[in-house]
Image: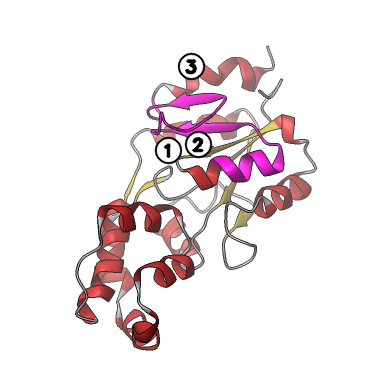
Amino acid sequence: MPCRLRGLIFDIDGVLLDSRSSNMEYYNLIRRALQLPPLTSEEEEYCQMASAEQSLAYIIPPEYREEAKSVCKGIDYRKQILPLLSVEPGLLEFLHWLKLHDVRLGIFTNRANWVEELLRYFSLESFFFPIMTAGVCPPKPSPDGLLRILQEWRLKPSETAFLGDSKVDEQAAAGAGVPFWAYRNPLLTAELHFCGFFNMITRITPLVEGR
């Protein structure tokens, strides 16, 4: 546990945003275009935590992958996918409270594309720096993104925490030596577990104030 929290790093999917339905619609659009069956529950779980490149390699048979690239280009993300996303309840209040207490905020996500667009769409772009995506560093469970954020902030791992909701988040945090906080996933091994943002301020106030 950090003795004083000076920086908090967030995953996007399942933490900042309720994105499961939008992600599944995206991948099922591709599958339908290729006349493949809908995702299984196992495939859904994998796609929710993996990068797009990893997900497509997992759910698209090799003989369809070139055609899948063309299908992806034909999907209108702004019209077909963005409207299906929503901000987690209580998030904005939590972010404003952290900023008020000079806690730095960063992002480490397995998304490679559309991250800036998503943040602008939900008016979140001013809160986070730096933003590490699968387009600029190895995807989780690699800890590289977390280590690069720590280097940018010039903070020790013990002065930060990583808030995620999947096994790859947990593994990335362990690899970087950063305390891991689990969001809405009681099956993960974490220093703290949270069921939503509304109860987080009360629980972490002593860490933010260093007492």
Of the residues shown, which amino acid type is indicated by label 3?
Thr
Residue plotted at (51% across, 58% down) = 110
Disc 3 designates what residue?
A: 202
Residue at mark 1 to residue at mark 3: CA–CA distance: 15 Å
* First in residue order: circle 3 vs circle 2: 2
Place of residue 151 in the rendered image (x, y in percent of width and height, measured from the top left): 78, 48
Quarter of the picture containing the N terminus is: top right
Numbered tag placed on residue 17 in the rendering:
none
Asked which colour scheme the image uses, the reply is secondary structure
| Disc 2 + disc 1, Cβ < 8 Å | yes
Q: Which SS class for mark 1?
A: helix
Disc 1 designates what residue?
A: 92
Please tell me which residue lies in front, 64 or 89.
64
Q: In the rendered structure, does residue 180 fall within the stretch colored magenta?
A: yes
Residue plotted at (40% across, 71% down) = 56
Within 10 Å of disc 3 (Cα), the crowding (few <14, some 14-19, many 20+) is few
Of the residues shown, which amino acid type is indicated by label 2?
Leu
Of the residues shown, which amino acid type is indicated by label 1?
Leu
Place of residue 55 in the rendered image (x, y in percent of width and height, measured from the top left): 42, 65
Comparing marks 1 and 3, which lies closer to the viewer? 3
Q: Which SS class for mark 2?
A: helix
Residue plotted at (53% across, 47% down) = 168
Place of residue 65 in the rendered image (x, y in percent of width and height, measured from the top left): 39, 83
Residue at mark 3 to residue at mark 2: CA–CA distance: 14 Å
Place of residue 119 in the rendered image (x, y in percent of width and height, measured from the top left): 46, 56
Q: Which SS class for mark 3?
A: helix
Quarter of the picture containing the C terminus is: top right
Within 10 Å of disc 2 (Cα), the crowding (few <14, some 14-19, many 20+) is some
Disc 2 designates what residue?
A: 95
* First in residue order: circle 1 vs circle 3: 1
Residue plotted at (30% across, 78% down) = 75
